[in-house]
Image: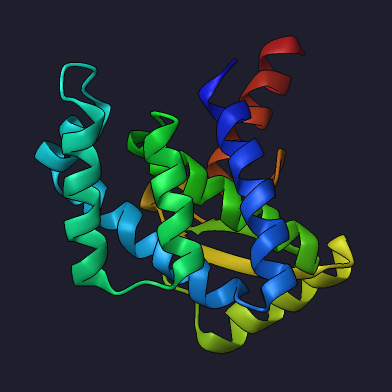
Amino acid sequence: MSITTVANRYAKALADVIMERGQTLAVADEIAAFSELVEQNSELRDVFASPVIALDRKKAVLRELLARMQFRPTTNNFLQLLLTNQRLHQIDGVRASLMKELDERAGVVSADVTTARVLAATEQEHLLNQLQAATGKRVRVNFKIDPEIIGGVVTRVGSLIYDGSIKNQLALMKQQLAKG
């Protein structure tokens, strides 16, 4: 079973629990904080991933971390479950799957918008409104800058890519000229 499949299963189960308990944002934030801690500390990640280190020692490390971070019982239990099932080192994938699952349940899609320059607030708002109209959903936009696209906009919503960059238009023109 792939890591993504496993992460999705854990994320769906956690989403069911936290939505039922009304702890969605709080637990999601705590999972994100723990994931960042593990990702920023390679020694910690290695401890949780190592098959050589005894589970009891890993549990002691996790208990100490949880005592310091003071998470909700739901978060603590979930992280302990991941550790018991030897999946805690995959927390970043679980976090990403959880965020995707929660967004899906809330009717939110994520979009990556790449432009050659920083867009003004009014331009960003206009683009956001266009994306919401096109998708029929609420859209969370992540703006990026890439001067290599020369101008225009490249937008990715899920697996769909809308490439309106000048770089792409020039490449298409080059192909057409080569054919003719």
Whether residue 15 is situated above or below residue 121 in the rendered picture: above
Q: Residue at x 29, y 56 (%)?
A: 36
Whether residue 167 is situated above or below residue 6 in the rendered picture: below
Along the viewing direction, whichever of 45 and 130 lies nearer the viewer: 45
| Residue 115 seen in the current view | yes
Along the viewing direction, whichever of 90 and 174 lies nearer the viewer: 90
Picture quadrant of residue 136: bottom right
Number of numbered markers: 0
Q: Residue at x 64, y 67 (%)?
A: 18
Identity of the residue furthest to the front in this view: 56
Q: Quadrant of the C terminus?
A: top right
Q: Residue at x 27, y 62 (%)?
A: 66
For this view, does 30 lie left or right of residue 20?
A: left
Whether residue 5 is situated above or below residue 153 in the rendered picture: above
For this view, does 143 lie left or right of residue 45?
A: right
Q: Residue at x 33, y 64 (%)?
A: 33
Q: Position of residue 160 (x, y in %)?
A: 74, 41
Along the viewing direction, whichever of 10 and 167 lies nearer the viewer: 10
Q: Position of residue 7 (x, y in %)?
A: 56, 36
Picture quadrant of residue 117: bottom left
Q: Quadrant of the N terminus?
A: top right
Whether residue 60 is situated above or below residue 109 in the rendered picture: above
For this view, does 71 lie left or right of residue 21?
A: left
Along the viewing direction, whichever of 70 and 97 lies nearer the viewer: 70
Q: Position of residue 130 (x, y in %)?
A: 79, 71
Identity of the residue furthest to the left in this view: 43
Structure colour scheme: rainbow
Q: Position of residue 51 (x, y in %)?
A: 24, 17
| Residue 165 seen in the current view | no
Identity of the residue furthest to the top in this view: 179
